[in-house]
Image: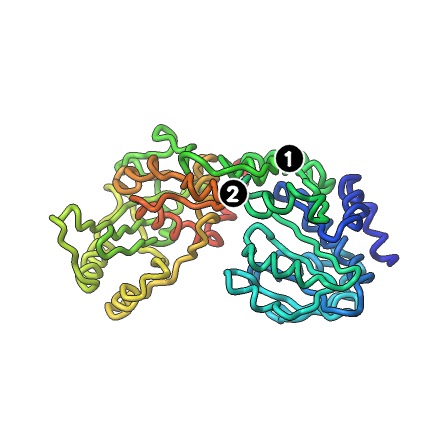
Amino acid sequence: MDALAGLTSIMSRAQLLSVADCTTAKIASWSGAVRSGKTFISLFAFLFAVLRAPKTGVIIIVGRTLDTINGNLFSLLTNPEIFGALTKYIKYTPGAKTATILGRTVHLYGANDASSETKIRGLTVSLAYVDEATIIPEAFWDMLVTRLSVDGARLLATTNPGSKNHWLRKNWILKAREKNLVHFAFNMDDNPSLSAQFKTEMKASYAGVFYLRFIEGQWTNAAGAVYSMWNEDRHLIDHADLPPIARTLAVGMDYGTTNTTAALLLGLTDEPQPRLVFIDEWHYSAAEHHGETIPDVELSRLFRDWLKGKHGPEGVYIPQPEYVFLDPSAASMRAQLHSDNLTPWAADNAVLDGIADIANLLSQDKLIVSSRCKTFLAEVTEYEWDEKASDEGRDEVVKRDDHAMDAARYAIRSTVGQWQHEVYSLAA
């Protein structure tokens, strides 16, 4: 308890009040901006709750996957710079399904689809912690609440805001009193560890709906153009004016049979402040060939011929791409490319994360697009959020003429670890 109490000196008043007030209801939720301290303070409250949890029933932590539980939670809980002497009372091996926290066994569950609720059927839960609650299936949440059947059982949850119509907001946060829930909303000013410079940098890092949610902490619907910050004057470059290319990071390919197959070549510029650039594009559309669809073997041949061709203007050397990232559902094309001695990798298909990456890059002028990328240029202004899905609390894009948009996501999201440090390093 002394180790827990020692951490209070680095907390804001809003954080401290949430730790005290979260005990007034069976369910407590923290939402708000990125780096607002909501995860840290909710974990602090969770540690107090572990000490007081009923001995009847199990303690569980829920996240989208075991990997996200490790990255989002245990990376903090086991960091002495954050939780100090408490870390010696927290035992966890990444990937394990149990941990020991303050002498109690804690069970870990991934909940990434509707069937996940079967994992906790029959459990009696005395304490639960839910990470990223807005991406947990509603059926899992509802089942979890029914498992809190012992006296004194509690549920703590944290999340970034989502749509105004998200089930968590509509059915729980807005009905807090009848649901025996208390909700805390945080912004970056509630985290005393952040400098003014860092907050300024973070505010410049997001755009559109992601700014409203991740910076202002608003629950807001995704509506209109996905890339509303797109501006040809800022983001389009004539192919003849391409800057020198330091690395060709990847090709991202979206595969279609009757639909268009599109591929985009992603590079990192050799400039004092590097930018990402879509250098060139290849696509095959049956609509442009009198409705003629072609087999994978022919698609592969055409793509590989393009890949071996010249992608830069005169005097600009374009290295061969380091990776080819393919639509993860395109099993037949993946097999064909392997057969043709080209190794494709399954792309990271985290749609919202990929969209956020591109939106943030565009908003900071850290992504440019060559005039050769005709399909990208035709789609980027028409790429829209799905209004019907938004009304139902889901963030989805309209699935229409989005082949280059998907290819762009695959290339950028799958290489984020390769470019993030260089592109976002501070300009001189």
Q: Is residue 227 visible?
A: yes
Q: Is residue 92 visible?
A: no
Amino acid identity at mark 1: Gln
In the picture, measured across the screen, residue 159 lies left or right of residue 232, that is right
Q: Residue at x 61, y 38 (%)?
A: 217
Mark 1 neighbour density, 10 Å: few (under 14) some (14–19) many (20 or more): few
In the picture, measured across the screen, residue 212 lies left or right of residue 191, that is left
Mark closest to the chain's N terminus, 2 or 1: 1
Q: Which residue is mark 1?
A: 197
Instruction: Please say if 281 is above or below 111.
Output: above
Mark 2 neighbour density, 10 Å: few (under 14) some (14–19) many (20 or more): some
From the top left corner, tell me how far across and down residue 12 is, in percent.
78, 40
Q: Nearer the viewer, residue 16 or 35?
A: 16
- Disc 2 secondary structure class: helix
- Disc 1 secondary structure class: helix
Q: Residue at x 36, y 51 (%)?
A: 248
Image quadrant holding the N terminus, namely bottom right
Amino acid identity at mark 2: Tyr
Looking at the rendering, which quadrant does residue 204 occupy?
A: top right
Q: Residue at x 46, y 35 (%)?
A: 363
From the top left corner, tell me how far across and down residue 398 is, in percent.
36, 43
Spatial separation of the CA atoms under disc 2 and disc 1? 14 Å
Q: Which residue is mark 2?
A: 424
From the top left corner, tell me how far across and down residue 354 is, in percent.
44, 48
From the top left corner, tell me how far across and down residue 70 is, in percent.
62, 62
Looking at the rendering, which quadrant does residue 211 occupy?
A: top right
Residue farthest along the top direction in this orientation: 233
